Image (spheres, rainbow, N blue to C red):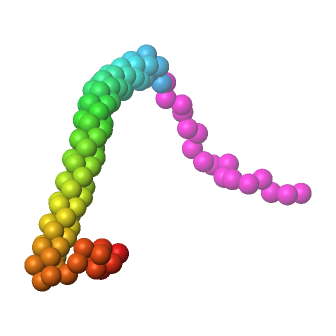
Amino acid sequence: MPRPKGSKNKPKTVKATVDFAARIAEKQFVKESVTTEIASITANIDALKVDLKTKKAELKSINKEIARIEAKKVKAETKAAESAKKAEAEDVLKKLLASGVSADEILAKLK
């Protein structure tokens, strides 16, 4: 016949009476503090969302302004390059006319 496991001489544990009212009160306090933290975090998140929205709108307007300025810069550079080419062509034309080259020969050189 098999032997039973465990000691027969082990001390009997007496279950202590649990104070359920105290544990409930403690858990209620923890619950209230966590609820308060959640409310403050939620309020903080809402404030940050509003701040984020304004910052995104500001960034969008800045990007639009940068694009406008870049377009103006390109336009000004193109205009300056065209005027420089025109001035250079006029100088070349004046030099050729001063040296006695005919208009047909000038047109042939320009092409």
> Residue 66, image x and y in percent?
24, 46
Image vertical order of residue 38 relative to residue 82, above or below: above
State yes or no: residue 84 in magenta. no
> Residue 75, image x and y in percent?
24, 52
Q: Is residue 18 left or right of residue 65?
A: right
The residue sitting at 40% across, 19% down in the picture is 28
Q: Nearer the viewer, residue 56 or 2?
A: 56
Q: Magenta part of the protein: which range?
A: 1-17
> Residue 44, image x and y in percent?
28, 28
Q: Is residue 80 left or right of residue 36?
A: left
Quadrant of the image occupied by residue 42: top left
Q: Is residue 56 left or right of residue 94?
A: right
The residue sitting at 19% across, 70% down in the picture is 89
Quadrant of the image occupied by residue 94: bottom left
Quadrant of the image occupied by residue 46: top left
| Quadrant placement of the C terminus | bottom left
Q: Nearer the viewer, residue 1 or 22?
A: 22
Q: Is residue 88 visible?
A: no
Q: Could you tell me how many numbered marks the image carries? A: 0
Considering the whole magenta stretch, tell me its main secondary structure. Answer: loop
